[in-house]
Image (cartoon, helix red, strand yellow):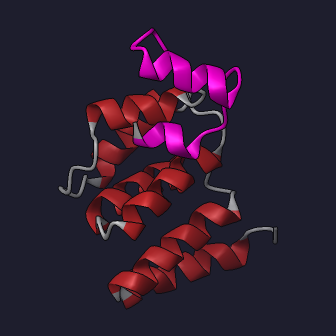
């Protein structure tokens, strides 16, 4: 139910929680994130660039905005699930390449993991984008 923590209610918080608690059918606000969690969960294997591109094509019609995956990546990072968070953020960077917050989140991940090379690349990309 992790995705339900980071999303906004479909109807209202109370009605949504009642649907979930009683086991009734519930359609999450963010179908792309729900599909990702159902399919991938917090698996730790890094995905290849080719596979990430394939998945981005699948998720593009489902994704509502960059914040659904960004919020989930923050939860994964807080749990120190670095590879899972990186997969989520890399998918998000393919879905929303012009969104600065996506790249800022990737930069934060690479800062926390100490990956200076990938951090430099993120900062280069950020420098080419319009400020928030």
Percent across and percent down for residue 86 are 37, 62
Q: Is residue 28 visible?
A: no
Residue 8 in the image: above or below residue 75: above
In this picture, residue 24 sits left or right of residue 105: left
Q: Quadrant of the N terminus?
A: top left
Residue 56 in the image: above or below residue 88: above
In this picture, residue 43 sits left or right of residue 86: left
User: In percent of the image, x 31 and y 68: which residue is there?
Assistant: 82
Give the total of numbered labels: 0
Percent across and percent down for residue 36 are 38, 36
As rendered, which of 107 and 34 lies closer to the eye?
34
User: In percent of the image, x 45 and y 9: which residue is there?
Assistant: 25
In this picture, residue 114 sits left or right of residue 59: left
Instruction: Identify the image quadrant of residue 62.
Output: top right
Residue 42 in the image: above or below residue 74: above
Q: Which residues are magenta?
A: 2-28
Q: Quadrant of the C terminus?
A: bottom right
Instruction: Identify the image quadrant of residue 129.
Output: bottom right
Percent across and percent down for residue 75 are 44, 59
Residue 96 in the image: above or below residue 46: above
Specify whether residue 73 is painted magenta: no
Q: Residue furthest top?
A: 24
As rendered, which of 45 and 25 lies closer to the eye?
25
User: In percent of the image, x 44 and y 9: which residue is there?
Assistant: 24
Q: Is residue 47 visible?
A: yes
Percent across and percent down for residue 48 are 25, 53
User: In percent of the image, x 38 and y 60: which residue is there?
Assistant: 76
């Amino acid at each position: 139910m992790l995705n339900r923590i980071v999303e906004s209610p479909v109807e209202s918080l109370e009605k949504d929680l009642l649907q979930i608690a009683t086991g009734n059918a519930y359609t999450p606000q963010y179908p792309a994130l729900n599909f990702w969690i159902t399919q991938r969960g917090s698996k730790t294997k890094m995905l290849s660039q080719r596979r990430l591109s394939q998945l981005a094509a699948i998720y593009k019609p489902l994704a509502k905005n960059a914040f659904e995956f960004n919020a989930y990546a923050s939860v994964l990072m807080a749990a120190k699930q670095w590879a899972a968070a990186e997969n989520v953020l890399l998918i998000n960077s393919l879905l929303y390449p012009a969104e600065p917050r996506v790249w800022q989140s990737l930069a934060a991940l690479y800062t926390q993991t100490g990956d200076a090379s990938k951090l430099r690349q993120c900062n280069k990309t950020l420098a080419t984008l319009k400020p928030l």
